Image (spheres, rainbow, N blue to C red):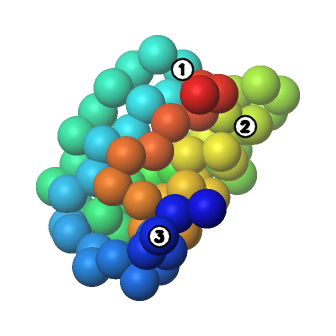
Amino acid sequence: MLKIPELAMPRTRKVTTVCNGKREVWTDYEEAKAYFLEMMMTAEGEERDRAECVYIQLLHGLDECSDEDE
């Protein structure tokens, strides 16, 4: 558990995502969320699972979101 929960951290407009090996830096947090929500709703199988993983992390306000297990 983190000492400061992610939800209590101030949100920046910049976010980095890694999905299916593709690293992308977004300057608009809401745009990134919309992109991954659309991908999650239109994709199937593993691609959908990857997008969902990133989207959930975006909902929690993380600055770096990845579909990879760490």
Q: Residues within 10 Å of mark 3 (few under 14, many from 20)?
A: few
* Secondary structure under the numbered disc 2 in the rendered image: helix
* Secondary structure under the numbered disc 1 in the rendered image: loop
- Whether residue 37 is visible, yes or no, is no
Q: Residue 3, labelled with which disc?
A: 3
- Whether residue 32 is visible, yes or no, is yes
Query: Are circles 2 and 1 on residues that touch, CB within 8 Å?
Result: no
* Secondary structure under the numbered disc 3 in the rendered image: loop
Q: Residue 48, labelled with which disc?
A: 2
> Disc 1 marks which amino acid?
Asn
> Disc 3 marks which amino acid?
Lys
> Disc 2 marks which amino acid?
Arg
Quadrant in which the N terminus is drawn: bottom right
Closer-to-camera residue (50/45): 50
Picture coordinates of residue 16, whole percent (x, y): 30, 43
Position above or below: 46 against 26: above
Horizontally, residue 13 falls left or right of residue 68, namely: left
Task: Give how far apart the Cα atoms at labels 1 and 3 are.
Answer: 30 Å
Q: Residue 20, labelled with which disc?
A: 1
Closer-to-camera residue (1/57): 1
